[in-house]
Image: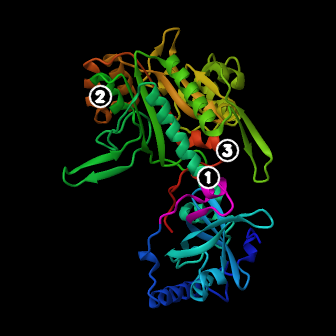
């Protein structure tokens, strides 16, 4: 007999007005006390599985002896026999307990196990009449007693805030969520493998910085008591990595957490994971090839295809993303002209502002002219770029750390890789002229010299080789690969307002 329906579980209890959570917890504590009174302390027991649940199923052979362990997720009492499901990271397997095999005492002990408890079991493989691969238990040991019942909806926890706030419950209740985060781990591993194979050196740079730089964002501030000064959580990885180019490391990368004290939305988190890579004697074209090759490599290694399908909960295809190269290349200004009018860059700033508002772009009263244009791009154009697109030659004011385009001094040698309607990776030819770099950064900070990273500028004065640099939002990349609609769905512990 198979145990696949949670409604069959005699212990699949939920807190109700008749059985509040406190009562259920007390009942489980009483069971733990009873175990200890019998000389059994689950938390002191040890057990070594011979294989995972998935391996046991994959290597099925009638009568083969195995030792498996996991959390009990289903339980069905048949009188003189019982079926339970256990689950580990790899998946589930069914266990079959018989009174005449275990004996009266052990069988009674097995009967009083609860959903959520961890057990280890020795036994032999067999297949039920319906073809369910199972383990006939010859002995077992209790490895942990769950003092709280599982989530109210064991198969499919649906409370979104609870899923984010207590992610461990989400992982317990939703195997698909666990699989998603295992895939995320594989994605990051393949990125590292790709870069290592290309000769990049992985490094670590400070999270605490005296001057936050490398991006235009509001930082989080903290105070160092021993030094009696303020520090900032980094908003980017860029400037320390470029110091390493100055020092003679020709190919460097870092995957690290970045913090920006700004809004929270479907695409934005105050804490997120960034990959940044820098290569000497390269430019934005080099980084374009790097990004395309890396994303395709990850897709093939982790998902086995360059065609990705985003599906709804019923399996219906909502969106298809084709990663097969070559990816489209188009200039930033050309996209703006297509959406906002061929004369966009010929009309006055006041006319651009009025037209942008009429088109539906959100324009703040403090926006400068280049920010008005970029609002049109970010709000009206970028969300339409579902298929991989390299948007090149953005406006010069947007990226003060990039080199000016030789054919259009109002733009810089840059691209934004957009997939799935959002920016995945910006990259550019790095500015290595220390004089021009200082001028550009001074323009950005508006004369507030205390915001200039003087050490970075001094480093440039020692000489930095021409280079290409790339940043990639790992969370957004995972959203694209895994078909999620919110960045919180690919972050294990997203930031939430305290209760």
Mark positioned earlier in the residue sequence (3 or 2): 2
Task: Indicate the secondary structure of the residue bearing disc 3.
Answer: loop
Q: Residue furthest top?
A: 407
* Residue found 51% across the figure and 69% down from its top: 499
Residue matched to label 1: 179
Question: 106 or 172: which is nearer to us?
Answer: 106
Res. 202 image quadrant: top left
Residue 453 seen by the camera: yes
Q: CA distance from mark 3 to mark 2?
A: 39 Å
Task: Indicate the secondary structure of the residue bearing disc 1.
Answer: helix
Q: Was residue 53 drawn as part of the magenta stretch in this picture?
A: yes
Query: Vertical placement of 163 versus 325: above or below?
Result: below
Instruction: Point out the frontmost of discs 3 and 2.
Output: 3
Q: Position of residue 59 (x, y in %)?
A: 64, 54
| Left or right of 238 in this view: 386 | right
CB under 8 Å between callouts 1 and 2? no
Q: Position of residue 96 (x, y in %)?
A: 67, 73
Task: Indicate the secondary structure of the residue bearing disc 2.
Answer: helix
* Residue found 37% across the figure and 35% down from its top: 213
Magenta stretch?
48-68
Residue matched to label 3: 483
Q: Residue furthest front?
A: 63
Residue 456's mark?
2
Res. 385 image quadrant: top right
Query: Vertical placement of 379 versus 2: above or below?
Result: above
Res. 9 image quadrant: bottom right
């Amino acid at each position: 007999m198979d145990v696949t329906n949670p409604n069959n579980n005699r212990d699949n209890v939920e807190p109700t007005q008749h059985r509040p959570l406190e009562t259920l917890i007390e009942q489980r504590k009483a069971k733990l006390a009873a175990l200890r009174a019998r000389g059994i302390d689950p938390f002191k027991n040890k057990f070594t599985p011979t294989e995972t649940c998935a391996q046991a199923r994959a290597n099925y052979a009638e009568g083969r002896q195995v030792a498996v362990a996991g959390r009990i997720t289903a339980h069905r009492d048949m009188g003189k026999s019982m079926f339970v499901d256990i689950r580990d990271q790899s998946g589930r397997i069914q266990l079959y307990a018989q009174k005449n095999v275990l004996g009266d005492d052990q069988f009674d002990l097995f009967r009083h196990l609860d959903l959520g408890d961890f057990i280890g079991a020795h036994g032999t493989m067999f297949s039920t009449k319906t073809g369910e691969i199972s383990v006939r238990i010859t002995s077992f040991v209790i490895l942990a007693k769950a003092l709280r019942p599982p989530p109210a909806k064991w198969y499919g926890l649906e409370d979104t805030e609870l899923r984010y706030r207590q992610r461990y419950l989400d992982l317990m209740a939703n195997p698909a969520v666990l699989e998603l985060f295992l895939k995320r781990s594989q994605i990051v591993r393949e990125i590292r493998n790709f870069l290592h194979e290309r000769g990049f050196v992985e490094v670590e740079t400070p999270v605490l910085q005296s001057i936050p730089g490398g991006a235009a964002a509001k930082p989080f501030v903290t105070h160092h008591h021993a030094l009696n000064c303020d520090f900032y959580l980094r908003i980017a990885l860029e400037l320390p990595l470029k110091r390493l180019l100055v020092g003679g490391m020709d190919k460097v990368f870092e995957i690290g957490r970045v913090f920006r004290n700004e809004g929270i939305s479907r695409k934005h988190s105050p804490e997120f994971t960034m990959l940044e890579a820098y290569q000497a004697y390269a430019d934005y074209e080099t980084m374009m090839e790097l990004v395309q090759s890396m994303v395709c490599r990850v897709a093939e290694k982790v998902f086995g295809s360059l065609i990705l399908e985003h599906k709804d909960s019923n399996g219906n295809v909502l969106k298809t993303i084709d990663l097969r190269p070559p990816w489209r290349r188009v200039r930033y200004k050309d996209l703006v002209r297509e959406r906002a009018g061929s004369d966009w860059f010929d009309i006055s700033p006041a006319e651009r502002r009025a037209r942008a508002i009429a088109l539906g772009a959100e324009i703040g009263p403090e926006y400068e002219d280049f920010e008005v244009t970029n609002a049109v791009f970010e709000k009206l154009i970028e969300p339409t770029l579902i298929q991989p697109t390299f948007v090149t030659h953005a406006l010069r004011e947007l990226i003060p750390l990039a080199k000016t385009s030789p054919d259009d001094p109002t733009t810089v040698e840059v691209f934004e890789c957009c997939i799935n309607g959002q920016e995945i990776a910006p990259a550019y030819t790095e500015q290595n002229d220390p004089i021009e770099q200082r001028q550009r950064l001074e323009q950005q900070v508006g004369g507030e010299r205390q915001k200039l990273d003087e050490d970075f500028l001094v480093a440039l004065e020692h000489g930095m080789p021409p280079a290409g640099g790339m940043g990639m939002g790992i969370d957004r990349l995972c959203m694209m690969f895994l078909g999620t609609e919110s960045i919180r769905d690919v972050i294990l512990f997203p930031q939430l307002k305290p209760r």
